[in-house]
Image (cartoon, rainbow, N blue to C red):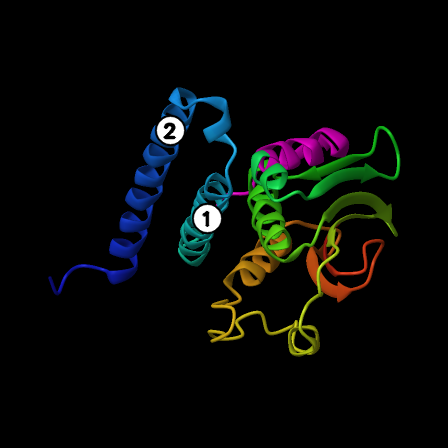
Amino acid sequence: MSGLDLSTIIASTVHDMKNSLAQLGQAHARWLAQLPDELQHTPERGVIEYETARLNGMLVQLLGLYKLEVNQLPLYPSHHELDDFIQAQLARHRDVLDSRGIQARGEVSEFDLMGFFDQELLGSVLGNVIANAIRYARSALLISASEQDGELLLYVNDDGAGYPQQMLERQGDYILGLSQSSGSTGLGLYFAARIAQLHQRDGRRGRVELSNGGPLGGGEFRIYLP
């Protein structure tokens, strides 16, 4: 055992866990299809689907962070239409949003707004942010995209209570330690910041910012890409 690398073992185990979770999701979907309609739309279904998506997101982050540390996470940026990209992210969470009664919408500043980014990596970041927003939103969620000072800005805003003041004051330090009240480790924000920094152009790197307020009055996550 002395010759084994613990981080490699953990990464391999996480990969297997992700595959098992996918199998569970497929079995759950088949089981639901066999139920009568009145038993398909229950609060328990919303809990199962939300927590499954949340677990999958955490496993994706852990694998991504491992690959970042060993320089095995390539960046494949290309041009993407932001309206299509945002709608695809919302569609992935539609069942959970509906089960929780959250009205979610996407907005772009221009009809044909384009961005140059790695769709899979940025999708992983937004998936985690959306899942977090669903957890704290009361009834509304907004994803918006615009161009500001030559950068692409994507933000996710909810109508919840907003980010804790301590998190806003220390947002440059994304590993905040385990929160006894929320169970948060800050890894999601750290992962988002690392993915943002991979996107660079003309000496500028991507970055993330947290704030409270915005159109819906709650927490607002912003990611800027050059």
Crowd class of label 1 (few under 14; some 14 to 19; many from 20; radius 10 Å): some
Q: Which residues are magenta?
A: 73-94
Q: What residue sits right under mark 2 in the picture?
A: 26
Looking at the picture, how far across and down is residue 28, in whole percent?
A: 37, 32
Q: Is residue 19 left or right of residue 78?
A: left
Vertical position of residue 13 compared to residue 161: above or below: above
Vertical position of residue 24 compared to residue 196: above or below: above
- Determine the residue located farthest toward the left in the rendered image: 1
Asked where in the image residue 160 lies, by quadrant, the reply is: bottom right
Asked where in the image residue 219 lies, by quadrant, the reply is: bottom right
For image coordinates 84% across by 44% down, the residue present is 146
Camera-side residue of 4 and 93 = 93
* Gap between marks 2 and 1 measured at Cα: 15 Å
Crowd class of label 2 (few under 14; some 14 to 19; many from 20; radius 10 Å): few
Q: What residue sits right under mark 1 in the picture?
A: 51
For image coordinates 70% across by 78% down, the residue present is 169
Indicate the secondary structure of the residue bearing disc 1.
helix
Looking at the picture, how far across and down is residue 136, in whole percent?
A: 63, 58
Q: Is residue 26 left or right of residue 163?
A: left
Q: Is residue 7 a member of the stretch shown in magenta?
A: no
Camera-side residue of 179 and 47 = 47
Q: Type of residue at label 2?
A: Gln
